[in-house]
Image: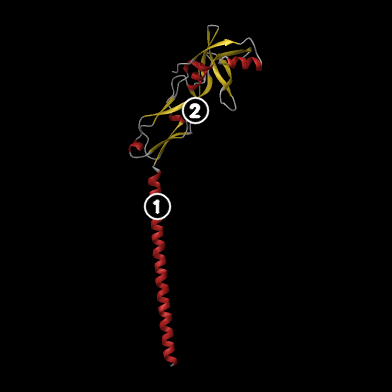
Amino acid sequence: MSKFEKLEVDIRKEQGTSAARRTRLRDRIPAILYHSGVEATPLSMDKKSLYKALRTGQMIFEVIVDKKSQFVLLKEVQYHPVTDEVMHVDFQKVREDEKISLEVAVRSIGESQGVKLGGILVQLLNSVTIKCKPSEIPEFLEIDVTEMEMNTNLFVKDIILPEDVEMMTAEDIAVMSVQEPKEEKEAEVSDEMGVEEGSESAESGDSEESSDKAEESSSDSADKSDGDNQ
């Protein structure tokens, strides 16, 4: 199970555009925390800590407000249109005992039989949507490709799921594929084209030979006709 990145945050007493600008000048990022039935809480957090947390790729974080810990879901990150710096972050509070839906990355494990024979493993789906409690969110999901032969696929239904984790993505979607190298396919196409060109050349040669014979026959007939006239 994943270890959630912890974010120390402060409650913002000032709100509005000017207040948010002053917050960013102190190398802190303004944020807001939404939770059902309660008024949204304006927050601010250290810029470096937030960037570090975002680089983990996680969607759930542990936010500590007034020394109280709670889980939050990353809902939206607003970036500056020119510098790409983070301008504002929206969080939504989630309960520890309530399942939520979110995307999780998929990784392959093992070496497929098809790859050992020269095939190429292609990942067709990088992430899937699952449903589970915040404390049960896996860092990533695994799919075992060991038994994959050449020109075969694995599907969402083949992904290994931890206990108490539900799959929300359709099970018939392909995730992994072992394919033949393109060079071999191109070589086969070239060989087929070569055979066709050879056949066309042979047909062309036969046609030219027939034409030559026809010309010779026509010439012989003309010579014979001239002899008869004389």
Q: Amino acid at mark 2?
A: Val
| Residue drawn at the location 55% of the way across and 18% of the way down | 73
Most foreground residue, 193 or 159: 193
Q: Which residue is found at the position 40% from the left and 83% from the top?
A: 220
The type of residue carrying mark 1 is Ser
Question: Is residue 59 positioned above or below 223 on the image?
Answer: above
**Circle 2 sits on which residue?**
128
Answer whether labels 1 and 2 touch (C-beta < 8 Å).
no
Residue 207 is tagged as none
Q: Secondary structure at mark 2?
A: strand
Which of the marked residues, 1 or 2, is nearer the chain's N terminus? 2
Coloring basis for residues? secondary structure
> Could you tell me if residue 156 is visible in this image?
yes
Residue 21's place in the image compared with 111, above or below, is: above
Task: Examine the image and state in which quarter residue 110 appears.
Answer: top left
Within 10 angstroms of label 1, few (less than 14), some, or many (20 or more) residues? few
As drawn, 164 above or below 176: above
Residue 108 rendering spot, x and y as whole percentages? 40, 29
Which residue corresponds to the image point at 39% horizontal and 42% vertical from the top-left? 181
Residue labelled with disc 1: 190
The residue furthest top is: 67
Crowding at mark 2 (Cα within 10 Å: few <14, some 14-19, many 20+): some
Q: Position of residue 95 (x, y in %)?
A: 54, 13
Please state the horizontal and vertical placement of residue 44, each as a whole percent of the image: 58, 13
Disc 1 secondary structure class: helix
Q: Which of 133/52 is in front?
A: 52
Label 1 and label 2: CA atoms lie apart by: 39 Å
Question: What quarter of the picture does the N terminus occupy?
Answer: top left
Quarter in which the C terminus is drawn? bottom left
Relative side of 103 to 195, left or right: right
